[in-house]
């Protein structure tokens, strides 16, 4: 495996490619060179052999070969001369020369070891062809010693008649040894060339692979998020230009990722701090993005993996399916949360996410908390209904009594006086209602300005008691006023606080039975504010009504409150006046035990500017 990985290296591939190219080129050149040299040497050897053979045939064409009519002594002298001739004639060492007569018998041989062949007939095919007059007779043979030899047979003519032949066998071992030496030299030269090429290839390939390795390291660093490194530029060639382009790409990618990360952080911060809940899905409706507000509104800590939008919202799948098909929709949902006393109402807007050339890629669900808006709308409807009802009742009464007066009751003084009194009473009730509405309107529009002044608390509280002394005597209610010594004075809007105290004391008198008691106190609260408390021993307020007691036109006992002349706006006005001072008002009550209303007002240091 390591060897396989090694051959995956571009450096090894380059070196192997160069070596293979050189090896192939050298082999082609070597084959051509050796083949040509071999052919040249063989041709030269054969040509030399033929030349000497031709010279020998010309020499022997003189009447020197023995004939059949010669004497035996003379024949012996001729054979001796032929033996001496062939022994010293040839310059090719190791060549065997036989001189044959017309019958193919050996007359002389150049090798002393083969003298036994003299007188024997040479049966070689080449000899037979030569004795038949064929001049070009040659072949290569391999003898028993595995030695390659060249064989030539040529006819000897005398006076146009074949008188014999010469048979030459020359060893080609020296020639092939020479060829083998040349091959060895060529192989050695090839190996040396390949070795030098490999060394040079390593050096040259390093100049190519080193920048590539540097590019690879930089690419790995970029993949790991490290953009501070740079690829070294070794030159102005293609790889150098590639390195420059890669460094430029790294800088651009770093900038792009920085911008992308910044945008993602901005988006995450926006999503996290949005007052609206946001959920995003993929193309199949599975939730992939949820912000913190959405989890709070849905009352969940984490969505399970693979949860769909319909499961998260607790609605049917049809609106989600329509949104995935490209249709926008909106619906109201009501969700009861454990940590909240009232239900949460929110509007869900489903908007498809469209991607270029891919259609709808998901859905964004925006959750808007409309609980307050719904409460305000409900309050507005109730307010309009209450105002209409409060105005219609006295108007109906006034109309009825006016019609009665018009129908003749005016002629009966006692009856007319009673009817006029009712009309006056209902008119005053309408005036009080309109006045209270104007007060609330001023507070809602922030047009009611406070005129703060230094107030003696004991004097202010005692004057409140004096204003209600008649009602207190009628119901035999005892009142006590207690002001803490260190809290004798305060900076207040006297008219506004008088209106608040009048309302609270009036309510305490209304709902306290005959013979009860009311305690009015002013002290420093633990929060550092001025606390004015009105405590009665009245019938109390049910716990379920305490949360709504300050709502406009809200009455615990509607029929009784209306009969007592109340408009249902007194506590609302009192709360707005206290809020305008920067304070708060609270009620604590137990049924058939009594009620304590506490007004908390900020203490303005003496000498500071009054509002």
Image (tube, rainbow, N blue to C red):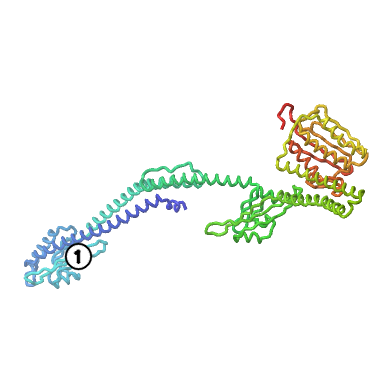
Q: Nearer the viewer, residue 610 or 280?
A: 610
Q: Residue furthest front?
A: 411
Image location (x, y in percent) of residue 399: 83, 52
Say if 207 sits above or below 310 in the image.
Answer: above
Quadrant for residue 273, please give it.
Answer: top right
Give me the residue at 62% from left, 47% from top: 271
Relative to 75, is 441 on the left or the right? right
The reply, left or right, for residue 411 in relation to residue 450 is right
Q: Quadrant of residue 233?
A: top left
Residue 216 in the figure: left or right of residue 287: left
Observer-nearest residue: 103 or 412? 412
How many marks on residues? 1
The residue lying at 30 percent from left, 52 percent from top is 190
Say which residue appears at 81% left-offset and 34% top-offset.
532
In-front residue for pair 104/549: 549
In the rendered image, the quadrant that contains the C terminus is top right
Q: Position of residue 20 (x, y in %)?
A: 35, 54
The crowd level at tag 1 (other Cα within 10 Å; few <14, some 14-19, many 20+) is many
In the picture of the structure, the residue carrying the numbered disc 1 is: 151
Label 1 sits on a secondary structure element that is strand
How far across and down, in percent of the image, does residue 188 sit? 30, 51
Q: Is residue 461 above or below residue 426?
A: above
**Picture coordinates of residue 398 (x, y %)?**
84, 51
Towards the viewer: 466 or 73: 466
């Amino acid at each position: 495996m390591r060897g396989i990985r090694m051959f995956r290296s571009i450096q090894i591939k380059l070196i192997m490619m160069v070596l293979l190219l050189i090896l192939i080129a050298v082999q082609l050149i070597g084959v051509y060179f050796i083949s040509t040299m071999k052919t040249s040497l063989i041709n030269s050897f054969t040509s030399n052999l033929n030349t000497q053979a031709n010279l020998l045939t010309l020499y022997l064409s003189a009447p020197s070969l023995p004939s059949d009519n010669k004497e035996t002594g003379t024949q012996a002298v001729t054979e001796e001369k032929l033996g001496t001739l062939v022994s010293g004639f040839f310059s090719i060492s190791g060549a065997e020369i036989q001189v044959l007569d017309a019958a193919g018998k050996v007359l002389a041989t150049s090798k002393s070891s083969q003298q036994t062949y003299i007188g024997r007939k040479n049966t070689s095919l080449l000899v037979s062809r030569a004795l038949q007059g064929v001049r070009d007779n040659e072949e290569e043979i391999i003898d028993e010693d595995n030695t390659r030899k060249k064989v030539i047979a040529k006819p000897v003519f005398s006076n146009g008649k074949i008188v014999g032949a010469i048979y030459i066998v020359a060893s080609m071992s020296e020639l092939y040894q020479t060829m083998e030496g040349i091959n060895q030299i060529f192989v050695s030269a090839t190996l040396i060339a390949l070795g030098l090429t490999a060394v040079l290839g390593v050096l040259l390939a390093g100049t190519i692979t080193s920048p590539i390795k540097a590019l690879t390291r930089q690419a790995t660093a970029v993949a790991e998020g490290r953009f501070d490194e740079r690829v070294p530029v070794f030159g102005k060639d293609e790889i150098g230009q590639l390195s420059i382009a890669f460094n430029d790409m790294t800088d651009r990618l770093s900038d792009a990722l920085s911008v992308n990360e910044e945008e993602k952080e901005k988006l995450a911060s926006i999503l996290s701090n949005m007052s609206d809940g946001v959920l995003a899905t993929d193309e199949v409706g599975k939730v992939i993005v949820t912000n913190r507000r959405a989890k709070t509104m849905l009352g969940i800590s984490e969505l399970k993996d693979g949860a769909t939008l319909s499961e998260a919202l607790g609605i049917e799948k049809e609106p989600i399916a329509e949104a995935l098909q490209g249709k926008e929709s909106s619906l109201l949902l009501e969700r009861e949360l454990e940590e909240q006393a009232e239900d949460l109402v929110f509007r869900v807007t489903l908007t498809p996410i469209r991607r270029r050339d891919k259609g709808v890629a998901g859905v964004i669900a925006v959750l808007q908390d409309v609980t307050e808006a719904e409460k305000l709308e409900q309050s507005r409807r109730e307010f309009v209904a209450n105002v209409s009802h409060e105005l219609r009742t006295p108007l109906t009464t006034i109309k009825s009594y006016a019609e009665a007066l018009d129908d003749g009751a005016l002629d009966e003084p006692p009856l007319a006086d009673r009817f006029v009194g009712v009309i006056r009473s209902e008119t005053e009730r309408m005036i009080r209602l309109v006045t209270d509405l104007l007060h609330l309107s001023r507070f809602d529009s922030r047009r009611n300005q406070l005129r703060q002044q230094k107030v003696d608390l004991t004097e202010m509280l005692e004057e409140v008691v004096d204003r209600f002394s008649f009602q207190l005597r009628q119901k035999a209610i005892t009142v006590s006023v207690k002001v803490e010594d260190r809290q004798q004075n305060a900076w207040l809007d006297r008219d506004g606080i008088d209106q608040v105290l009048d309302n609270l004391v009036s309510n305490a008198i209304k709902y306290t039975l005959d013979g009860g008691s009311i305690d009015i106190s002013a002290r420093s609260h633990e929060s550092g504010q001025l606390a004015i408390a009105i405590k009665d021993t009245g019938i109390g307020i049910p716990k379920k009504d305490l949360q709504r007691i300050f709502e406009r036109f809200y009455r615990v006992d509607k029929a009784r409150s209306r009969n007592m002349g109340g408009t249902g706006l007194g506590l609302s006005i009192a709360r707005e006046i206290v809020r305008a001072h920067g304070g708060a008002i609270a009620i604590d009550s137990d049924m058939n035990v009594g009620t304590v209303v506490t007004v908390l007002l900020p203490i303005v240091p003496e000498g500071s500017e009054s509002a």
